[in-house]
Image (tube, rainbow, N blue to C red):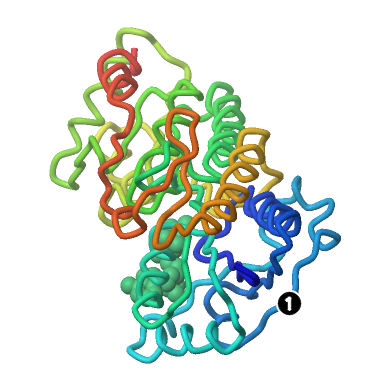
Amino acid sequence: IKRIALLTSGGDAPGMNAAIRAVVLTAAACRIEVIGFEHGYIGLLEQEYRTLLPQHVHNIIQRGGTILKSARCPALQTPEGPKLAADNLQQLNIDALIVIGGDGSFRGALEIARYYDGQIIGVPGTIDNDVDGTTNTIGYATAIDTALDAIDKIRDTADAFERIFLVELMGRHSGYISLAAGIAGGAEQIICPEFSQITPKDLRQITTPIQHAQLLMGKASYIIVVAENSYPGGTTALAEALTKAIGIECRACILGHIQRGGSPVGADRILATKLGAYAVEALQQGAHLQMAGEVHGEVTLYPLAKTGDRTKAIDPYLVRWQQQVGSY
Ligand code: ATP
């Protein structure tokens, strides 16, 4: 391998820069040239790229976002997109492509692979942690801490004044961030797609524990963490429905994109360094259509095609504890 290309795609995640740095430094040590496409697959389709040398990645390990920028790229999902991407890679003499992103980005990589002769490897970078084949994704640990900081602050105001808050956290269609931040923030309830199906017609699952807590424990504040996409109409609609149902004002707080930003925590920097370096090493050993992940502390390769299968369990121990004990 003489020349590899790198891009960051999908929602940006803290630690993507640390992964870029690890790829560039590892490649440089192996005398492999690296180019970075800007704005995810858009840069690949539009040949917007730059050479990445070690001096370009100094002092970025602690920075959130991604120096290559990230984007969603509908053009790759058109019939012509993947072939054009592959043609551009061949034309630039790229021997291998490293995609840092989530399972959607890996689906895009698989489409490109149908027309591309070189190797492709993925590095899991998304706050959502919804990628199979790695215990944690890059960005997840930071997102938990960011959400937790917000929950702690909301708890202060809830204790002092308002009583019931619904805090909506990101996760697309998964509840990893919500379960982790909810547990760490001492949330009375956690609503995630994996274990709570709430419908407008049946709110009892939420209201009964609230009423018990108010009556029996006399709680001053009550926090419900809600994973996005858990309720038809969104978390604000859920707060309104609950207010009506129990006669106590329930407030919604949608945390939003703040969860994608910020300086990566140590765990994300370490994971990103490990997986970025491993991706380069694995490519040299011939890896193709694999994701560089970490399971039980060990680096491992996992088929890109299976990363979106959603077989990674959300911690069953914590789910059970939260459901049986957490709202006391
Ligand atoms: P995150 O979940 O953190 O936002 P992601 O990588 O899953 O990350 P997506 O928006 O699902 O984010 O995908 C990123 C990009 O990957 C899309 O904008 C598109 O360019 C490409 N992509 C996704 N699915 C496909 C597909 N089936 N065919 C071609 N390209 C795809």
Q: Amino acid at mark 1?
A: Arg
Q: Which residue is mark 1?
A: 50
- The percent position of residue 275, horizontal first and vertical second, equals 56, 46
Residue 175 vs 229, above or below: the answer is above
- The percent position of residue 218, horizontal first and vertical second, equals 39, 11
Q: Is residue 208 visible to the viewer in this orientation of the structure?
A: yes
Residue 112 vs 61, above or below: the answer is below
Residue 195 vs 23, above or below: the answer is above
Q: Nearer the viewer, residue 192 or 32?
A: 32
Residue at the image point whose x is 68% and y is 68% from the top: 68
Q: Specify the farthest residue to the left.
A: 201
- The percent position of residue 245, horizontal first and vertical second, equals 24, 37
Residue at the image point whose x is 73% and y is 77% from the top: 50
Q: Nearer the viewer, residue 243 or 2?
A: 2
Q: Nearer the viewer, residue 116 or 293?
A: 116
Queried on whether the Cβ of the residue with tag 1 lies below 8 angstroms from ligand 1, the answer reads no
> Which element type, helix, strand or loop, lies under badge 1?
strand
In which quarter of the view is residue 24 placed? bottom right
Q: Is residue 252 visible to the viewer in this orientation of the structure?
A: no
- The percent position of residue 131, horizontal first and vertical second, equals 38, 49
